[in-house]
Structure formats: structure tokens, C-alpha cells
Image (cartoon, rainbow, N blue to C red):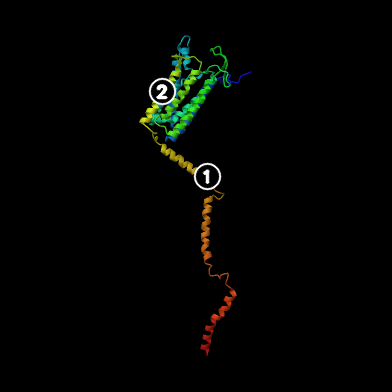
């Protein structure tokens, strides 16, 4: 009986002529774009201008990539600087190896630089970006699927991940826990949690970002514990498990202290944001009016035609009222004609008396 499993891609790179198209790189790039897109929408809702998130991301993303790679190389230095290591391989980011902790830490430095240049507070920017970061991580984790790396312990569950053997790198084929998929689903749940909590409790002053960090670390700890790739251990736990626990405690502490010192949400009014929003609303209102008032072939709108009808009726009413001199329907014309000579008799008698 053949067990069901999740297949791994046969190749992780496709060459378009001399240009290699790597699945790992595409996942990272798509994750960045989705994160910036969602962050931009949330930033506008908080009173910011469209495009600010992308402008700051120009600083944050390169810093984050460098920080993520540095964390990976420092914590897993043997393939690069150990015995028979290759130092130049430390620059081969496309082959995998980005530590989220270093990416967030150094990426925050880049974001701080960008925020100072735009004159906006970093905590408010981080709150707007938090759910997008979680979704970006969920997408980026599929890069591990393309590279067949960072999987979990062996399993025969129906959703097990099929890994092909590769003696060149010491990879043993078989079916393993798809830890990349577990983390992807967990990150999507974290994004939904942050969006809900931010809307329900109006989180501010960096607390939405702290909630994202704490929730992610809670999931990363047990997912990291399942992995079987080589890692340094401290007191029987993988280094990244300890990192997740420490960062979780720091995030929770920041959340609690921040809620006491600065409750509520700060108001963000980025210079030019009000004018930009007013222009957008005016344009939307103008478009709505144009759609609500279509014109016919003569260029007339239904409202104009409707306005002309009461005027016409009003003009006709005086003409109707002036015709009240007509006899009433119940009067008989014959009776009126018979009475007419009787009215003229006194005048006739007066004329005869004068003649005599």
C-alpha cells in the first residue's frame, strides 16, 4: 500500500537562457510585495499617505536581507568558515539560509532610518506592517519547499513531505513532517489574529507589532523543535528554540508596559495625507455623480427632465382658472335665454312714454 504524501518539486530552479529563475527567490520577492501592499492599506487607514510604506521598505528590505543572512551564517558557520568550509558561499542567499530573527532586527534599523527621513513614528509604522510581515513569511516559507530543506522528523502521516535523496549534501530520502507548511499556516493565523485584535482593541504604540512577534514565536518554538537539520543546542534545546522563547518574553513584556504607559492608539497625521485623502474622496464623489446622472442623446439628464415637468404644469393652472365664467353644468341655457327679454321690458316702456 502506497502512502499519500506531499511531493517536492524535482527542481528548484529553471534557467531562462543564462538567467536562473529560482523558486526560493520568487517566494521571498512575492512575500515582500504582498507584505508591502497590505501594509500600505493599513497605513492609509491610520492616516498616512499612499506609497509611504513602499518608500520605507526601500530601506527596510535590504537591511532585513543582510540581517537575515548574517544571523544564519553566524549561527550556522560550519559550512562557510568551519573545516572544509567555503566562505564565499555565505553570499549565496538564493541557496537558502535567512534567519527571521536577524531579518526583523536589522530590518527594523532600516525602517527606523526610513521613518526618520519621512518624519513619522516607527511604532505606528510597525503596527501597520505587522500582519503583512506575517503573510510575507507564510509565502516565503514555500522557498524551503523548492529547496527541499528545513523539514521535520520522519512520519507516515497523509500530509507527509516527500524528500528525494541527495548523497552530495547528505540528504536522505523519505517522508517527513512538512514544517514549512506548518509555519506557513501558523503565520496566516498570526496575521488574522493581529488584524482582529487591532480592530477590536485599537492597538497602538507598537503593540500590534509586539503581538505579531509574540504569536509568531509561540508557534516557531514547537515547529523548530520538530526539525532535524543540524543546529547548535543549548541545554538540550536548539538555539532557535531558545531565541523564540526569549523574544516571546520580551514581546509580551513590551506589550504590557506599553499598554500601561501609553494606552490607546496614537493619531497619525502624515504631512499631505489629509489633502491626498480629500482629493481622493472628491474624485470618487465626482465619479459617483457622473455614474448616477447619465445623459441621453440630447445631453439631458433625467433630473433635468423631471424638473421641467412641474414647471409646465404650474404654467397651465392659471389658464384653467380663468375659465370660471362658463355656465355651470347644472344650469340650463334655455332658461337663461328666456329670462333675457324680461330684463329689457322696463327700458322698452320708458322709451314709449317719451314718444307719447
The N terminus lies in quadrant: top right
Tell me the residue that label 1 is attached to: 291
Q: Secondary structure at mark 2?
A: helix
**Circle 1 sits in a helix, a strand or a loop, which is it?**
helix
Quadrant location of residue 339?
Answer: bottom right
- Whether residue 317 appears in this view of the structure is yes
In this rendering, the label closer to the viewer, 1 or 2: 2
Residue drawn 54% across the image and 83% down it: 345
Q: Is residue 158 above or below residue 124?
A: above
**Label 1 crowding class (10 Å Cα cut-off): few <14, some 14-19, many 20+?**
few
Question: What residue is shown with label 2?
Answer: 249
Query: Is disc 2 surrounded by few (<14), some (14 to 19) or many (20+) residues within 10 Å?
Result: some
Q: Of the numbered discs in the image, which one, if any, rests on residue 238?
A: none
Whole-percent x and y of residue 49?
A: 43, 34
Distance CA(mark 1)–CA(mark 2): 55 Å
- Residue closer to the observer: 262 or 37: 262
Amino acid at each position: 500500500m502506497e502512502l499519500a504524501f506531499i511531493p517536492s518539486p524535482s527542481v528548484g530552479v529553471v534557467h531562462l537562457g543564462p538567467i536562473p529563475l529560482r523558486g526560493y527567490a520568487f517566494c521571498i520577492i512575492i512575500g515582500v510585495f504582498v507584505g508591502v501592499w497590505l501594509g500600505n492599506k493599513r497605513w492609509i487607514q491610520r492616516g498616512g499617505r499612499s506609497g509611504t510604506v513602499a518608500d520605507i521598505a526601500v530601506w527596510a528590505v535590504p537591511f532585513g536581507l543582510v540581517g537575515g543572512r548574517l544571523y544564519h551564517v553566524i549561527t550556522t558557520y560550519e559550512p562557510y568558515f568551519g573545516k572544509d568550509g567555503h566562505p564565499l558561499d555565505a553570499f549565496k542567499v538564493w541557496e537558502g539560509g535567512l534567519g527571521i530573527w536577524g531579518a526583523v532586527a536589522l530590518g527594523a534599523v532600516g525602517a527606523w532610518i526610513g521613518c526618520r527621513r519621512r518624519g513619522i513614528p516607527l511604532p505606528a509604522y510597525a503596527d501597520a506592517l505587522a500582519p503583512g510581515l506575517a503573510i510575507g513569511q507564510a509565502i516565503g516559507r514555500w522557498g524551503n519547499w523548492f529547496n527541499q530543506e528545513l523539514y521535520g522528523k520522519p512520519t507516515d502521516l497523509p500530509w507527509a513531505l516527500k524528500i528525494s535523496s541527495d548523497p552530495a549534501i547528505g540528504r536522505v530520502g523519505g517522508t517527513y513532517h512538512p514544517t514549512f507548511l506548518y509555519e506557513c499556516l501558523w503565520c496566516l493565523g498570526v496575521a488574522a489574529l493581529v488584524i482582529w485584535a487591532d480592530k477590536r482593541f485599537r492597538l497602538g504604540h507598537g503593540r500590534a507589532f509586539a503581538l505579531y512577534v509574540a504569536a509568531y514565536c509561540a508557534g516557531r518554538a514547537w515547529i523548530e523543535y520538530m526539525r532535524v537539520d543540524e543546529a547548535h543546542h543549548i541545554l538540550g534545546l536548539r538555539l532557535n528554540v531558545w531565541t523564540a522563547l526569549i523574544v516571546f518574553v520580551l514581546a509580551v513584556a513590551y506589550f504590557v508596559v506599553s499598554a500601561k504607559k501609553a494606552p490607546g492608539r496614537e493619531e497619525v497625521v502624515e504631512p499631505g495625507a489629509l489633502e491626498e485623502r480629500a482629493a481622493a474622496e472628491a474624485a470618487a464623489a465626482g465619479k459617483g455623480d457622473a455614474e448616477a446622472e447619465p445623459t441621453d442623446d440630447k445631453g439631458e439628464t433625467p433630473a433635468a427632465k423631471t424638473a421641467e415637468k412641474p414647471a409646465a404644469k404650474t404654467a397651465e393652472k392659471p389658464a384653467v382658472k380663468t375659465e370660471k365664467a362658463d355656465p355651470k353644468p347644472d344650469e340650463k341655457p334655455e332658461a337663461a335665454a328666456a329670462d333675457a327679454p324680461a330684463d329689457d321690458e322696463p327700458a322698452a316702456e320708458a322709451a314709449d312714454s317719451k314718444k307719447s
